[in-house]
Every structure is written in C-alpha cells, then in structure tokens.
Amino acid sequence: MDIDNVTEANRHEFDVKGFLQGLSEAPGVYRMFDVCDEIIYVGKARNLKKRVSSYFTALVTHIDHIEVTTTHTETEALILENNLIKQHKPRYNVLLRDDKSYPYIFLSTEQEYPRLSLQRGARKQKGRYFGPYPNAGAVRETLNLIISNSTMRR
C-alpha cells in the first residue's frame, strides 16, 4: 500500500500528548512509522522526551506511530541509529549527515605498512572503517590505547 493512496478515513489520530507523557528522558533511538508501517525516520537522542517532542511540528502529518529503544549511553544510541538507518533506509534520513559527520577509525589496507587514523566525511579510501564514534576525542583516546598496547607487547 502506498502512503499517498491512504485516505484520511483510514488514518487514526496519533496521540502525541499521551505518547510524550510516557516517554523516557534517557538516551536512546526512535523510529517513526507511516500508516503503511514503514520506517520513515530514525533518530537518536541524549534525552528522548525533548528530542522526539521537537518533531511534531515538521513530520506530524506523516507519523502514524513511534517506537523507542532506550540505551545506557548516547554512544550506544549512535551505533544503533547508524545500524537502523543502514538497514531500513528511511526516506527522511540522510545517512548520518544531520549537521556533522561522525568520526571513524580508519585502517588503510592498500599500503605495505597499514596505518590507523581518524577519518571524517566520505569513506572513499580503500580500507576498514570502525565506528562511528560520538566525537573526535573518543577516536583519539581509542587510537592512543591501541598504540600504547601494541608498543607494550614488543
């Protein structure tokens, strides 16, 4: 069923106030569905209640229902969001390009001596990418741990 062919009589009214009242302020990921039960948007939030409530002016006519998954940390939410966007390709998402590009650890595989580095933006180079990370500081900390552990074993 195509969403454009759904009549107003077929739609039920989404209870925005009721939904927001029971929503957690924990970090997590939210998935917005249309009347055809297709995911139209996936997002992550540091505070689910604040973030999700900000959407009801822009996408409200397209939202039929919302599912929420709380996480322990914002980093877990970021990884889950990334995986859900890759899996479902929601029409209102542009893969992790909301106003910033997330950093990754990049392992080059084309050189004789592969190197690890921080990588932002398009992932065009041949190699392995690990992430996304919530910020460049987390990537640098991880790289320092990897490097210090590898030099200790020598």
Image: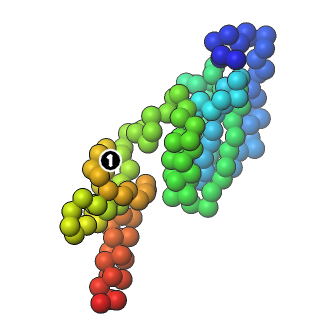
Q: Is residue 20 left or right of residue 99?
A: right
Secondary structure of the residue carrying numbered label 1: loop
Q: Of residues 23 and 41, which is closer to you in this image?
A: 41
Locate residue 63, reporting x and y percent.
66, 26
Locate residue 42, reporting x and y percent.
57, 39
Name the quadrant containing residue 148. Answer: bottom left
Q: Is residue 16 visible?
A: no
Total residue callouts: 1
Locate residue 19, reporting x and y percent.
74, 37
Q: Residue at x 55, y 32 (%)?
A: 90
Q: Residue at x 67, y 25 (%)?
A: 34
Q: Is residue 101 above or below residue 55?
A: below
Q: Is residue 2 visible?
A: yes
Q: Of residues 137 and 55, which is closer to you in this image?
A: 137
- Which quadrant holds the C terminus? bottom left
Q: Of residues 140 and 47, which is closer to you in this image?
A: 140
Name the quadrant containing residue 33. Answer: top right
Image colouring:
rainbow
Locate residue 56, reporting x and y percent.
61, 28
- Give the residue number, with chain letter if any, for mark 1: 123
Q: Residue at x 39, y 64 (%)?
A: 138
Q: Amino acid at mark 1?
A: Arg
Q: Residue at x 62, y 42 (%)?
A: 30
Q: Is residue 144 above or below residue 42?
A: below
- Which quadrant holds the N terminus? top right
Q: Of residues 44 and 83, which is closer to you in this image?
A: 83
Name the quadrant containing residue 111. Answer: bottom left
Instruction: Check disc 1: other Cα within 10 Å, few if <14, some if 14-19, many if 20+.
Output: few
Q: Is residue 61 above or below residue 118?
A: above
Q: Is residue 126 left or right of residue 16?
A: left
